[in-house]
Image: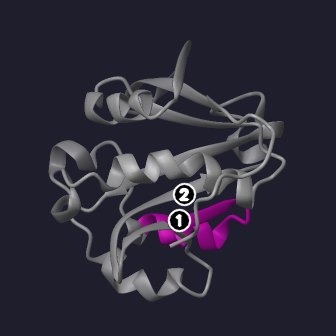
Amino acid sequence: MFRYGDEHGEQFRDQLLGFQLPAEQLQFTGMPEETLQDIKEDAGKEGVVIACGERAVGFFILHTGEGISDFFPDYGDAVLLRAFLMDYASQGRGFAIAAMLQLPDFVRRHYPEARQIVLAVNERNTAASQLYLRTGFQDHGLRRSGSKGTQLILQYALPSGSVGGLVDG
């Protein structure tokens, strides 16, 4: 995984813009052509590329600061995961699970003040919610009404301490 603004991240721009999703998935996330513009306009948002070698397979946004208070009121120590998507051609190959398992160390490395990762997932998006729950996110019963229905607010507590041995890449 690479931060989009890092030396490695932006080389994937054209690949990200070529991502495809079926309509049933598209209703739950933003495509890179929208989200790349979003990170340019908001300093609290940072894009992250999920790559396999020289190929982008996924993308998401990490969002910090007051801008996440609509999603999670205790935003001071939280990083919000947004717009997570895997290119349709790369789905079913374990990339999403691998990315979610690497996410805690990635967040600790780049956001050392963070004590938790939060996300909102539409309750109808069972594939995504199962992925998040299988990779350590917890459902403490928080809900939010979104434009496309009820969203589950899932949390991942980040214990303080050293970052594991994972390397960007």
Helix, strand or loop at mark 1: strand
The image position of residue 49, as x and y in percent, is 47, 69
Q: Viewer-proximal residue, 152 or 69?
A: 152
Q: Give, as a three-letter code, the residue at label 1.
A: Val
Query: Which of the pair 37/102 is nearer the observer?
Result: 102
Please tell me whether residue 29 is drawn above or below residue 4 in the rendered image.
above
- Badge 2 marks a residue whose secondary structure is strand
Residue 159 in the image: x percent, y percent? Answer: 74, 34
Other residues around mark 1 within 10 Å, as few (<14) / some (14–19) / many (≥20)? many
Displayed quadrant of residue 142: top right
Query: Magenta segment, which residues?
Result: 34-48
Q: Kindly identify the residue that appears in the image at 63 percent across and 64 percent down.
A: 46
Check the image and report above or below for 114 versus 19. above
Q: Earlier in the sequence, mark 1 or mark 2?
A: 1
**Residue 54, above or below 82:** below
Q: Amino acid at mark 2?
A: Ile
Alpha carbon of mark 1 to alpha carbon of mark 2: how far? 6 Å
- In the displayed structure, 14 sits above or below 138; it is below
Q: Position of residue 108 (x, y in %)?
A: 72, 51
Residue 2 image-quadrant placement: bottom right
Q: Are marks 1 and 2 in contact (CB under 8 Å)?
A: yes
Q: Is residue 166 left or right of residue 112?
A: left
The residue that mark 2 highlights is 61
Q: Is residue 39 left or right of residue 94?
A: right
Circle number at residue 48: 1
Q: Which quadrant of the figure has residue 115?
A: top right
Circle 2 residues within 10 Å: few <14, some 14–19, many ≥20: many
Q: Is residue 80 magenta?
A: no
Instruction: Kindly tell me whether residue 116 is visible in this rendering.
Output: yes
Does residue 14 appear to the left or right of 38 in the view shown? left
- Residue in the image at 61% along x and 46% along y: 104
Q: Residue at x 33, y 28 (%)?
A: 130
